[in-house]
Amino acid sequence: MIFILESDEFQIILGSMFGDGGIYYKNCNIPRFCEKHSTKQYEYLKWKSEFLIRYKPRLYNYEYGAFLETASSCDFIDFREKFYSKSNIKSLDVDLLYKLRPLGMAVMYMDDGYYNNRDDICYFYMFMKSKESQKYIGEFLLERYGIEYNIYSHKNGWSIGLCGKNKDRFLDIISPYIPDCMSYKLGNLNDWDSRVKKKEYGIKYRNNNRNKLLKQKKEYRLKNVDKIRINRKEFYISNKSRISLEQKNKRELHKLFL
């Protein structure tokens, strides 16, 4: 069967394949869709299963994890061929990436993204560990929705970060598709009073502890000179084109006022 591009089934499976889902063969030559999460995410898997009724989904909730598994279906063969190499390792398919719609994006984010309350940043920790793969995701968000992104390094690889108005725009796009059980991944998007209070508290704390914070910042820089230098270099390389464009715009703007 050929999926309709905007169908919910297609977007749930596609978003999951860019997240924690997988297409596997089990005791036959026809694949099935499977996904595993912690027991805390059982309700989330249950929500997914409601979109996949035609594939007779089965849910399991054990002490060590929650599982979703469908019946075998030829509908999953194309997904299997697109996402998996001959070595059975899941990889990024750029063509299918650009078929994601808001529902699929929401699923991708709920699977592999999270909202950092301290930094007020949305992060994506995708299954693809390379910087190049992360950049494909970022460029998709930029080209399709005008959402600018940053690429960050961490001990397990690379991640995408969305800040400020870009973070707000992304969350506004996906929020209608987020079930209640996963609303925590929206941060304080739907609670404006909490966001204002948090900002006011931060300003007050910084004003009252200015000297203490400056001292901590100086000590951190002295202890991590090499690390900071490497991170700055990697950030510049990852975002070189965007930085160059911003610098060019600033120069042109400056000329207007000369």
Image (spheres, rainbow, N blue to C red):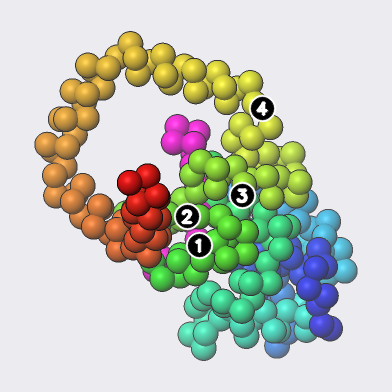
What type is the residue that disc 4 sits on?
A: Asp
x and y percent of residue 38 in the render?
Answer: 59, 48
Q: Residue at x 60, y 53 (%)?
A: 109
| Residue 4 higher or lower than 152, as above or below | below
- Asked if labels 3 and 2 touch by Cβ distance under 8 angstroms, the answer is no
Left or right of 229: which side holds 68?
Answer: right
- Asked if labels 1 and 3 touch by Cβ distance under 8 angstroms, the answer is no
Dot 1 crowding, Cα within 10 Å, few <14, some 14–19, many 20+: many
**Mark 4 vs mark 2, CA separation in Å:** 24 Å
**Mark 4 vs mark 3, CA separation in Å:** 16 Å
Dot 2 crowding, Cα within 10 Å, few <14, some 14–19, many 20+: many
Q: Residue at x 68, y 39 (%)?
A: 183
Instruction: Please tell me whether the stretch drawn in magenta is mainly helix, strand or loop.
Output: loop
**Mark 3 vs mark 1, CA separation in Å:** 12 Å
Give me the disc on residue 138: 1
Give me the disc on residue 77: none
- Mark 2, residue position: 149
- Asked if labels 2 and 1 touch by Cβ distance under 8 angstroms, the answer is yes
Reading the chain from its start, which is encountered first: label 4 or label 3? 3
**Mark 1 vs mark 2, CA separation in Å:** 6 Å
- Mark 4, residue position: 191
| Residue 25 higher or lower than 202, as above or below | below
Reading the chain from its start, which is encountered first: label 1 or label 4? 1
Dot 3 crowding, Cα within 10 Å, few <14, some 14–19, many 20+: many
What type is the residue that disc 1 sits on?
A: Gly
Q: Residue at x 23, y 57 (%)?
A: 233
- Mark 3, residue position: 170
x and y percent of residue 220 in the render?
Answer: 19, 34
Q: Secondary structure at mark 2?
A: loop
Reading the chain from its start, which is encountered first: label 4 or label 2? 2
The residue lying toward the viewer, choosing from 119 and 30, is 119
